[in-house]
Amino acid sequence: MYFALFMVVILLITGLIWLLDIVALRKNRLIGVAEPWYVEYAKSFFPVILLVFSLRSFLVEPFKIPSGSMMPTLLAGDYILVNKYTYGLRVPILNNTFFETSHPKRGDVFVFHYPPEPTVDYIKRVVGLPGDKIQYQDKHLIINGKLLDVKFEDNYEYEMQGANIISARRSKEQLGEVAHDILIHDIPNQYNPDAPGAKLQDGETITVPEGNYFAMGDNRDNSADSRVWGFVPEHNLVGKAFFIWFNFDKFGRIGNSIH
């Protein structure tokens, strides 16, 4: 969000300088006199900044995955592309929708502004849609009374910060039309008593409010998600992740689609 604000400011400054030159400065400049340096720079940078700003705001935006909360689907260090128009075109910075296209579907991997701190972007998977009734028993999701199909694949080990090796079970979960991998650990989860996760552990059913979504990380026991901080409002949506375009440490991941 800060980068978008920075681009808006630079776009306005360069555009106003160029406009000022057209309507006033150029008329008073003697024939043969070179343009001032600031006019030359403004005319050079404005079209480039406008193009980049438009692409990032309305088509695709790059992001870097900072943590392992979406493992094994996404790894820390993955550079991904996010489709900005899948969930509607939005006013930059304000994030208000001015042209609707579609809404998140169950199973989508989506980027959104972190509800407790909207200047930070998060990435998770859509688990619950508006009106859905969510249960989470014995680390299995139940949505609208239906237990999701989960099949064990293999044992999975990964390294956390501090060189700690974590062991988990990799399973295939069918979430809506999307079959995706999840990681499950043999450790209990700890939540604030008022957090949705604590209510789920107590056997309560959570209903997703209208205009909101319930998000979870694929690394189910190592993810701060809707179980910790609550629902994702429609207003906070950024876009749908769809492509891994680079990873400095794992070149084999380049070009992988995100499902």
Image (cartoon, rainbow, N blue to C red):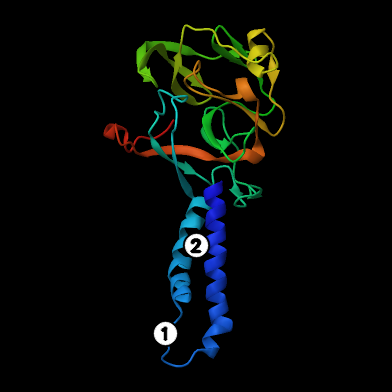
Residue under the point 65% across and 37% down? 234
Horizontal side, residue 249 vs residue 51: left or right = left
Q: Quadrant of residue 139?
A: top right
Q: Secondary structure at mark 1?
A: loop
Label located before the other in sequence (2 or 1): 1
* Distance (Cα) linking label 2 and label 1: 25 Å
Does residue 137 show up? yes
Horizontal side, residue 158 vs residue 216: left or right = left
Residue 88 horizontal/vertical position (percent): 59, 46
In the picture of the structure, the residue carrying the numbered disc 1 is 34
Q: Given the image, on which type of amino acid does mark 2 rest? A: Leu
User: Image quadrant for the C terminus?
Assistant: top left
Q: Given the image, on which type of amino acid does mark 1 rest? A: Ala
Horizontal side, residue 15 vs residue 258: left or right = right
Q: Quadrant of residue 113?
A: top right
- 94 or 259, which lies in front? 94
In the picture of the structure, the residue carrying the numbered disc 2 is 50
Residue 38 horizontal/vertical position (percent): 47, 73
